Amino acid sequence: MYTTHSEVDTGSGVPVKEPQRQLYYIELIKDIINKKENETGRKQLMYVNTFGCQMNAHDSEKLEGMLLEMGYGRAEKETEADFIIYNTCCVRENAENKVYGNLGMLKPYKKKKPDTIIALCGCMMQQSSVTDTIRSKYSFVDIVFGTYNLYRLPELLYSRLTSGEQVCEIMTGRGEIVENLPSVRHFRYKASVNIMYGCDNFCSYCIVPYVRGRERSRRPEDIIAEIKSLVADGVCEVTLLGQNVNSYGKGLEEKISFAELLRLVNDIDGIKRIRFMTSHPKDLSDELIYAMRDCKKVCRHIHLPFQAGNNDILRRMNRHYTKEDYLGLVEKLRENIPDIGITTDIMVGFPGEYNVDDTLDIIRKARFSGAFTFIYSKRNGTPAAVMEDQVDPAAVKKNFDSVLGEVNRICAELNLEKVGKVFEVLAEGVCGQDERLLSGRLEDNTLIHFEGDHSLIGSIVNVRVTESRIFYLMGKQEDL
Ligand code: SAH
Ligand code: SF4
Ligand code: F3S
């Protein structure tokens, strides 16, 4: 689950090109770490703490890949590590508060073990207000970098190790896509693959376009090559990742749509399941719906955030669709792919949203098999932050509770309908709560725990649903 790279020649100067340059620094750090291990008589350990979305989770796999290649081992907990890195998120205020809270707890640790290196990276660091706070209030942090230069961790760490000084590098602009750096996978049989970076949509509440930059698509041949090598390493399910996968291809020399990419991935031998996220309703084309319908390996599931139901709110959110457009898409999806599971993101309490009647209406009509529900959080620098009619938190809480209640009621109903039926499940691993059970997902992304032999892990199994809960199912392997 860990990619290594061929020998790098460290004798002939620092390479200018990437990824050779970072591979060069990795080699230099290997020596430093070796020396430290000889001095201390124990392995140097690292700990990566990830906040935020799948994009960050996947970035952390790349950070870990580089750190393992340098010679670090994995620490079980933060307070055993010699190198600690937080990959941060700023999509809502509480995500940022979590980072500051954890950081506060690191201060005494660093005091006790001053040789520990503490690094911060990710979305939060792309905001100058944050880097200013880090510099003034958290001066014990050693390395700070952002989302554009994640791949430069080796060079930045080398600079910190050799100079002993704090290193802070935040880039803006377009950001280079660097291929073929070491990476690890958190799961043996499933993997995430970035197909694009950044976002151009500028929904009026959202900070992501400011901290992840403009949309950049990876070349299809790089994506296909990565998936083929994952398959060769035992992966059978891939999730294609992007903030808005439906607009994949924009800006590439070769003209290619997301639907076309999906068909190319579907043709790869050995891949059993293909997922993707996230889709923006405004760019969900008929071509994509037909590709999902036709491609047997593409899971019957779509994550299609609608955020809010009221047309005036949707307009002020800059979402570029109406409630009717959204419900029309749901209908079209169900017509073409009858057993599709639709999941969504919902936000409550956007400025001016005093009631959630239209949101509840969409929930009832679309019947989501899952939903992430969020309370609107004001993000400085976004247009919504300066909108006048910010809603009273008590009213928001009440609306949020009714949205959550309705979402859960429908999820439970949909799960109950599955009881007694047989579904294909990719057995992903042993259930965290009960070692006798395996856990996996139905094609529509519903989680299921089921009785089955451990030898089934990594294969697709027929499972009969025996019980349903709000958020998951219980089942039993169906005898063939
Ligand atoms: N690109 C994806 C989602 C990225 S952020 C998409 O557009 O679907 C994930 C979710 O966080 C969003 O769908 C939205 O529901 C929520 N979100 C984004 N900004 C937020 C904010 N300021 N306050 C509360 N929730 C927010
Ligand atoms: Fe944010 Fe909208 Fe882009 Fe999603 S599509 S990341 S919500 S700006
Ligand atoms: Fe993801 Fe949070 Fe960044 S949701 S893109 S990690 S701001």
Image: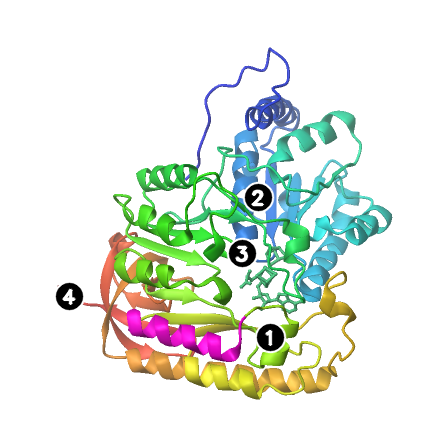
Q: Secondary structure at mark 4?
A: loop
Residue 414, disc: none
Which quarter of the rendered picture does the C terminus lie within? Answer: bottom left
For label 3, the crowd category at 10 Å Cα-Cα, with few meaning under 14, some 14 to 19 and many 20 or more, is many
Q: Is mark 3 within 8 Å of ligand 1?
A: yes
Residue designated by label 3: 243
In terms of secondary structure, where does tag 3 sit?
loop
The CA distance from mark 3 to mark 2 is 31 Å
In the rendered structure, which disc, 1 or 3, sits on the residue that comes first in sequence? 3
| Residue 165 relative to residue 182: left or right | right
Residue 150 picture quarter: top right
The main secondary structure of the magenta stretch is helix
Residue for badge 4: 479
* Mark pair 4, 2: CA separation: 41 Å
Question: Disc 2 designates what residue?
Answer: 75
| Kind of residue sitting beneath label 4 | Asp
47 is higher (above) or lower (below) than 26: below
Quarter holding the N terminus?
A: top left
Marked residue nearer the N-terminal end (1 or 4): 1
* Residue marked by disc 1: 314
Please tell me whether mark 2 sits on a helix, a strand or a loop: loop
